[in-house]
Image: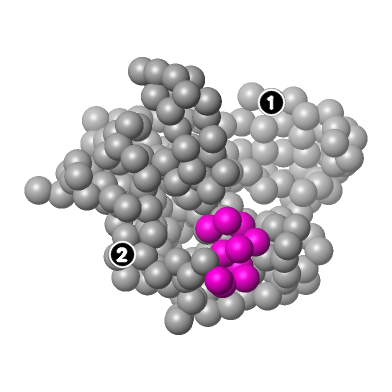
Amino acid sequence: MLDNPDGDEGYPGNMKVFVRYTFDDENVLTIKWSAVSDKDTICNLTNHSYFNLNGHKSGKVTENHKLKINANSFIPINSNLNPTGEITPVKNTSFDFTKPKLIGNGIDRKDEQVCFANGIDHMFVLNHSDKKFVLAAEAEGIDSGITLKCYTSQKGVHVYKANYVDVLPNMGKDSATYGENSAFCLETQGFPDAVNHKTFPTTILKANENYAQTTKYIFGINK
């Protein structure tokens, strides 16, 4: 539990935040967030775990991982990495993962969006249904056959492929060195900077209302 005092980092309200992690015998990691504030405030919580399904010493995920994202649109950014407020179709762009493909395939280094982020560091707008949970993304480590499915109650997933990771030699697990593109993140969340874009679903948590979101990461083996 986190007690966040009124005015911390400029945000109004005394807010209590609870995060619960569970891992079951079916290889499902579940993260449940809940929060309540005594004033209207912004609440948009996520998880920033890095994944490399082939093992942490296996090299760049851009070359040995397949990824599929359940999103026909993404949110462009400006040179400061802030959302422009637009929602853009992924078709015929570097951001089209509607079918499984290597993470590094089709990434156009001349694409302005790719240049801004040194790769993919963008919010994908999920193809939502009326169901409580939606499949956000699927990934597979080609060498290991380990698979990952991400389900969420959120409206989007921010995909980051460790574009700026540069861990000093021998500082990683088992003295490993982690460099650029050595992992990827699937950060389920509401739309970033939504408070400044009226077309985005709100991330304002009203006073004394309960915030509740759930994400599941399901691991398996592709035999």
Considering the numbered disc 2 on the image, is that residue within a helix, a strand or a loop? strand
Which amino acid type corresponds to the residue marked 2 in the rendered image? Lys
> Label 1: which residue?
2
Total number of numbered discs in the rendering: 2
Position in image of residue 44 (x %, y %) = 67, 48
Of residues 126 and 50, the one drawn nearer to the viewer in this rendering: 50
On the question of residue 71 being in view, the answer is no
Please give the label number shown on residue 101: 2
Please tell me whether residue 129 is drawn above or below residue 147 in the rendered image.
below
Of residues 136 and 111, the one drawn nearer to the viewer in this rendering: 111
Which quadrant of the structure image shows residue 210? top right
Residue sitting at 34 percent across and 40 percent down? 59
Residue sitting at 36 percent across and 47 percent down? 61
Considering the numbered disc 1 on the image, is that residue within a helix, a strand or a loop? strand
CA neighbours of label 1 inside 10 A, class few (<14), some (14 to 19), many (20+): few
Please give the label number shown on residue 73: none
Does 117 appear in magenta? yes
Left or right of 26: which side holds 90?
right
Left or right of 155: which side holds 134?
left
Q: Which residues make up the magenta segment?
A: 110-119
